[in-house]
Amino acid sequence: MHLSYSQINLFKECARLWQASYQLGKKQIPDHNLVFGSAVHKVVELRVAGKAPNILPTWKELWWGEFVKKAGKVVWQLTEEECYEIGVRIFSSKQVLGLIDELEVKKDLWGRPFIERKIEWQIEDLPPVIGFIDAIASDGVPIDFKTASRMWSPGQAARESQPLFYLAALTELGETDHNYTFRHFVITKGYFPVARVFETQRDPQQIEEMKETIKLVWQKIQAKEFEPNPKSWLCSPACPVIASCAPGREKWFGVENEVMTNVTSET
C-alpha cells in the first residue's frame, strides 16, 4: 500500500469518501475537467521536452486518439468537441506558447528531461507517499502544470499544500538546489487563454507540519475512523456515499429523496 497527495487531501476533506474510493472501490465518475486537464498537461509536457514542435496536430491526435477514446465513463458537462476547441484556443495563444517555450528543464546524465519525475517520501513506518513531479526546471525548482477556469492569485498559489510533498521528497533524496522554492504554471481555459507562472517559497517547518498531518491521517485509517463531511464542497449527487451521511437532506444537493434511494451507500 502507498499514500499520495490526492489521498491525503481527500481524507482531510471527507474521510467517508476516502474509504469509498480507496477501500470499497466506489470512486466518483470523473467529469470533463479531469480528462481535459490531463490532456492539456500531456501536450505541455511534450512541448517542454521538445517532442511537439507542431503543437496543434499533437493536441488533435492526443485528444481524439487517446484521451477521448480511452476516457471510459465521464460526466461530459461540456461536449468532447467543445473541450477540443478550448484546447485549440490554448495552443494557438502566442502568450501561452511563448511562456511554455521559455521553460528550461533539467536533464539527467543521458540528456533526458526531468518530466513526470516519480518521487517517494518515506515517513518513519508509514506507507510511502508517492507522487509525480510534472517537471523540474534547470535550476532544480519543481514545476506543476495546472489548468483553471480563471487565473489564480498569488495567495492561491501560496496556499497549495501539494508542493510540500514534492519538496520533502526531493530533499530526502539529497536534491536541495530547489531551496524550498516551487513554481505553478497555470493556464486559463477562457475564450482568450493566458498563462502565468507563480513562484512561492516554502520552509522546513511547513514540511514538518505536513508530516504530522499525514501521520494523523494514517492513524485514523488504521483505526477505521471514517467520519463523513456532508458540508464538503465535494458533496454532489454523484457521491457514492452521500445517501449514508446526509439522509433526509438530499435536496441540499438538488436531488429528490426517491432518487437517492437508488444511490449505492457504504455498508
Image (cartoon, rainbow, N blue to C red):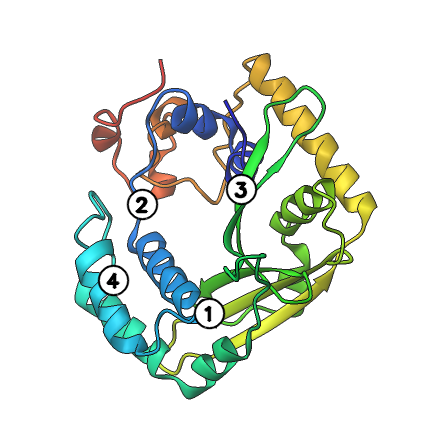
Mark 2 or mark 1: whose residue is earlier in sequence: 2
Q: How far apart are labels 4 and 2 at the CA level? A: 19 Å
The location of residue 183, given as percent across then percent down, is 63, 64
Marks 3, 1: nearer the viewer: 1
- Circles 2 and 1, Cβ within 8 Å, touching? The answer is no
Residue under pointer 4: 62
Q: Is residue 135 above or below residue 57?
A: above
Image position, residue 158 (x, y; %):
68, 60
Check disc 2 and report the residue beneath it.
30
Q: Amino acid at mark 4?
A: Leu
Amino acid beneath label 3: Gly
How many C-alpha atoms fall within 10 Å of the one at disc 4: few (<14), some, or many (≥20)? some
Q: Residue at x 35, y 78 (%)?
A: 53
- In percent of width and height, residue 105 lies at 56, 67
48 left or right, relative to 178: left
Marks 4/2 in contact by CB < 8 Å: the verdict is no
Please tell me which residue lies in front, 104 or 17.
Answer: 104
Q: Amino acid at mark 2?
A: Pro
In primary-sequence order, the first of circles 2 and 3 is 2
> Vertical placement of 67 versus 234: above or below?
below
Q: Earlier in the sequence, mark 3 or mark 1?
A: 1
Badge 3 element: strand
Amino acid type at circle 1 is Val
The residue carrying mark 3 is 131
Q: Which residue is mark 1?
A: 48
Alpha carbon separation for disc pair 3 and 1: 20 Å
Residue 246 in sight here = no
Query: Quadrant of residue 89 in the image?
Result: bottom left
| The disc label shown at residue 18, or none | none
Image: 86 above or below 12: below
Q: Nearer the viewer, residue 89 or 129?
A: 129
